[in-house]
Amino acid sequence: MIKSITLLKDNSEINLEFIKTHAHKVEIDSSFMNDLSITIQIEFKIPIIQFRSHGYTWKSLEQTELSNWYAPKILRLNNNQLVQANQHIGIWEVNKKNSRILNWHFNLENANPLVEYGFNNSKQIVQAVSKHRLLSPLALLFPIESSIEISRSKIPFSAIACFTDHCDFDTLINLKQQRQFFKTYNIKITKGFFLNHFSKRSDTACFEIHNQEISAWQDDDHELAYHSLSQSIKPLDESLNDFESFAPPFKGISTWIDHGFQPYNVSLYKNFDRISNHYGSSLKNNGINTFWNYTDSGTAVKGVINQLNPNQFTLHSFYNGIKHLKLKEQIPMFIKNVVFHYYNTEYSLRIYRDVAKYFKNIKHKKSINSHLRVLVVMFKLIKLLIPILLFWKTRKNQVYPLARYNPVIFNQDILNDTFTVFQTIEMIDFKLGLNQNNIDLLIKENGLFIAHTYFSAPLNYHHGKLFEKSNEIDKQVEENFSYLSHKIASKDIWNPTLKELIVHLQSFAMVTFECNELGEMLIIDKNQLAYRKVQ
Ligand SMILES: [Zn+2]
């Protein structure tokens, strides 16, 4: 059934050997798997007609279809023969234009993106580096009757809702209110906290002062995560001292969420020789094995919620999710989305920052120079928008660069230590992002989100906050969480902490499949995850 297998690497093509173990298994030479960025191109003699989606449904081949590591890797040929990968690793890509071809990609550009900041806080996207972890040589399996798919969720084939909260605005009072709120609705979150007291605001909560309340979150079965080490930035030496001397307040805190422009952030440490050589081992010695570093797939609005579905991360989807708002709300949201997600370049971000800074301080601006400067920057911003508006028909459906493959979690090696990186969807407005239709959509698509939230945000320009007035929970937002709570209770949605989710997904990634000489599928899975047959 296979015509040829080719290795594509650095613009070269090498024919690969493949061994037909028996009628139902073809093993691919995998000796090259130490090379970081490669594609294995498999040409079938018969066209592919269907593809198993990330939502566990059959899709006919209409456009480019992708299957990242967390989705089934199963397709159907025109003679009704099913084809399945023997492991979840890598990304499958098929395309109607070339329906005999299956591309199996490893470490594509932007498949595992990380953010790094330079000295002047200039942002660049780099690619995570980690060795491929093959469980056995790559193989394609050709079962007689049925394939097998494994559940990503602990609740078989349900959706997944996970919250990771940034504590930037937490105070003792609103921490207690948040904890009570989540207790009422039986929702678990991963709660960021500041270890040290250092803040421009006197009421910022931190472990140093509010250890009782922060410990109570753990007692309520939430996960605690470091949100760097303090709210505001100390002089450099003191900051680096903080990093070199910090000790875990509890056992088992394994997640780190970058905050502000702290010099010891994962996205910044390389700029500082004093910590760069032992950065990874310092995190590991303190029990940290997971981090977030500023990669959002997009912003949750109506119809944008499922991180596994790249089609939700386009300007068109975003526009549809905000078009019911007033124009004066729509325009800044749309521009922000264009800058942060559609372009996501240092150039676009700098322009946005300059314009935002001008309008933030508009009351204090007197000099003609500052008005002239902003005119130039506004002109540059408009220049970014013009091609989108002119070519809206084609541009509107382009998936944002960091959402095309949406790996959700992936590995990054820092010297000899391997870390798990997680990506998020920004969820600021819980009226738009967590509305009941979105929760239904997530369930329908068997989707997943890891939300990047600020539950205690008090800022006037944030709409749909948990606390609409100071210390008072918003009624509509509460209704949305109540709806979510019902769906968690009815087991339509699994609501793990980040740590629970990662442990489960790592087990998922370790599953392998076999097909015996009789064409029967077998699973090799010591964790006994939920599975089902696919025909
Ligand atoms: Zn923060």
Image: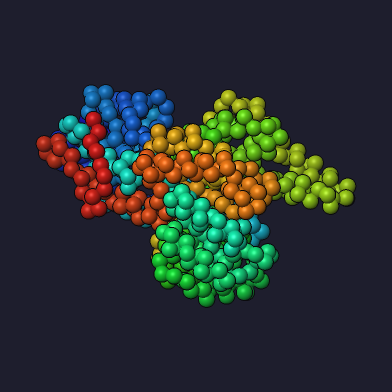
Q: Quadrant of residue 149?
A: top left
Q: Nearer the viewer, residue 181 or 124?
A: 181
Left or right: where does residue 234 sit relative to residue 22? right
Q: Position of residue 11 (x, y in %)?
A: 42, 41
Q: Nearer the viewer, residue 436 or 367?
A: 436
Residue in view at x 51 percent, y 69 percent:
212
Q: Nearer the viewer, residue 250 or 259?
A: 250
Residue in view at x 56 percent, y 27 percent:
394
Is residue 117 placed above or below 105 in the rendered structure?
Answer: below
Q: Position of residue 66 (x, y in %)?
A: 39, 36
Quarter of the image with the C terminus in it: top left
Residue 203 in view (yes/no):
yes
Q: Position of residue 484 (x, y in %)?
A: 45, 42
Is residue 178 placed above or below 228 in the rendered structure?
Answer: above
Figure colour scheme = rainbow
Left or right: where does residue 284 sit relative to residue 379? left
Is residue 404 placed above or below 419 in the rendered structure?
Answer: above
Q: Position of residue 199 (x, y in %)?
A: 65, 66
Quarter of the image with the N terminus in it: top left
Residue in view at x 75 percent, y 43 percent:
377
Left or right: where does residue 359 sit relative to residue 246? right
Is residue 267 placed above or below 327 in the rendered structure?
Answer: below
Residue in view at x 57 percent, y 75 percent:
241
